[in-house]
């Protein structure tokens, strides 16, 4: 059955998939046939071919924690098959060899060395700094509106570019220890990747060149930080040791790439998607305005369930012949795991298409995955989201959409987020 990649249609299609079965065969539409080049054609062909799709909450949870599935697409290949794989450019190799595509024991070793940087204790220590970054950005938005001659509650702001994007970028830059004077340049090198239309396939030359410069910059930064004893994540990763095992420089580089380029996108979309949902649900927005601090956690968890940033995990590979919900899955077969579909499963979340910031059990969503590949940055995203929603609606209770909801555009990425979110405040 066909599924749409358009967020305005996807959830209805996921409901049809769940009605058809627990593990169903699907293909994807809206694959942008206007994309250019061989890579675009390959990606389009991949999306349009048939895939096994895990549609229901219980089976999604099972697939995410089942060690019979691998995250490494090469796991069942023979040495001869691996040798025939096309070469991957260095910048994408770093991303493809991250935690996301490692299995134990490599994954276990890397996770143990990285996890302490995202402990609840570290997140609590970070709260004052995240709050200051949040307030500084909103102060800037107020000053920019004042300079244009605008006054409350008719001031204008694009919530994505003015706040939802720069806030988590500043936070992760602080955590990693990227010097303030370098951040403008780093932003130029990496921002094209955030805007890339994944459905067209490949990356343009400018984006690849930027990633190359970012990689070179990070290696130079590592050399400067070694042995300096600074209190930042890059320094800690360079010195991290677990049972006598340390991260190699390539592993540190891969981890920093993942944290910087992928880690903050979750928060960008969490803030944008949550605000957009609230603006379209006045009753829920009124609850948040009445108690911003008390409701912020509920907004975060319900947004992650209702409009989470990741629709599905594209490839978990069966390491052996197996069955899932009565469906035979042969060894080497890739399976798509439907996170967004699971989060709208009525068997787990009653009345799942209703956005409810007071929903009991919303935190049982699978937006961050589950099992050994549970998003390492999830604690940070949650803290950032809570601070963002509490501060936005405490400071600007009159904030509302500046355009009709139908004019707000979703990005054409595999990550569910908005191109922009014009608001009045």
Image (cartoon, helix red, strand yellow):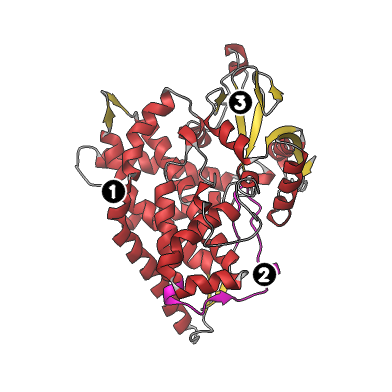
Residue 309 in the image: above or below residue 246: below
Q: Secondary structure at mark 2?
A: helix
- Say the numbered circle drawn on residue 317: 3
Lower sequence index among marks 1 and 3: 1
The residue labelled by disc 2 is 405
Taking depth in this image into account, of 296 and 395 the one nearest to the observer is: 296
Residue plotted at (25% across, 42% down): 225
Q: Can residue 388 be seen in this snapshot?
A: yes
Mark 2 and mark 3 lie on one chain; the one further toward the N terminus is 3
Q: Relative to 32, say whether 80 is above or below.
A: above
Q: Which residue is mark 1?
A: 121
Q: Quick one: SS at disc 3?
A: strand
Q: CA distance from mark 1 to mark 2?
A: 39 Å
Observer-nearest of 283 and 217: 283
Which stretch did the figure color magenta? 393-419
Q: Is residue 409 left or right of residue 126?
A: right
């Amino acid at each position: 059955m066909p599924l749409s990649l358009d967020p305005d249609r996807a959830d209805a299609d996921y409901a049809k998939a769940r009605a058809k079965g627990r593990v169903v065969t699907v293909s994807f539409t809206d694959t942008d046939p206007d994309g250019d080049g061989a890579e675009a054609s390959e990606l389009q062909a991949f999306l349009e071919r048939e895939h096994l799709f895990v549609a229901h909450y219980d089976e999604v949870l099972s697939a995410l924690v089942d060690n019979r599935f691998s995250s490494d697409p090469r796991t069942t290949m023979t040495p001869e098959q691996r040798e025939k794989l096309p070469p991957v450019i260095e910048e994408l190799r770093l991303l493809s060899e991250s935690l996301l595509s490692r299995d134990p024991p490599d994954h276990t070793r890397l996770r143990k060395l990285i996890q302490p940087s995202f402990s609840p204790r570290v997140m609590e220590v970070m709260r004052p700094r995240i709050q200051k970054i949040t307030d500084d950005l909103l102060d800037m938005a107020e000053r920019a509106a004042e300079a244009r001659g605008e006054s409350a509650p008719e001031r204008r702001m694009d919530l994505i570019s003015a706040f939802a994007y720069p806030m988590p970028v500043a936070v992760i830059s602080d955590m990693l220890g990227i010097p303030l004077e370098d951040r403008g340049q780093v932003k130029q090198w990496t921002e094209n990747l955030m805007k890339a239309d994944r459905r067209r396939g490949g990356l343009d030359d400018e984006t690849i060149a930027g990633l190359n410069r970012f990689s070179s910059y990070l290696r130079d930064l590592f050399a400067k930080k070694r042995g300096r004893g600074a209190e930042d994540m890059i320094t800690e990763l360079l010195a991290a040791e677990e049972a006598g095992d340390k991260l190699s420089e390539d592993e540190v580089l891969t981890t920093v790439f993942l944290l910087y380029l992928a880690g903050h996108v979750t928060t960008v979309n969490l803030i944008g998607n949550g605000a957009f949902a609230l603006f379209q649900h006045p009753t829920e927005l009124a609850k948040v305005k009445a108690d911003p601090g008390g409701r912020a956690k509920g907004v975060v968890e319900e947004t992650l369930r209702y409009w989470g940033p990741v629709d599905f995990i594209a490839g978990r590979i069966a390491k052996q012949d197996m069955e899932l919900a009565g469906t035979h899955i042969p060894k080497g077969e890739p399976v798509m795991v439907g996170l967004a579909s699971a989060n709208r499963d009525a068997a787990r979340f009653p009345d799942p298409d209703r956005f409810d910031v007071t929903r009991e059990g919303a935190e049982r969503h699978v937006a961050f995955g589950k099992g050994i590949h549970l998003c390492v940055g999830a604690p940070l995203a949650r803290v950032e989201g809570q601070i963002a929603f509490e501060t936005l609606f405490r400071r600007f209770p009159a904030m509302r959409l500046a355009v009709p909801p139908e004019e707000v555009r979703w990005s054409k990425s595999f990550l569910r987020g908005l191109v922009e979110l014009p608001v009045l405040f």
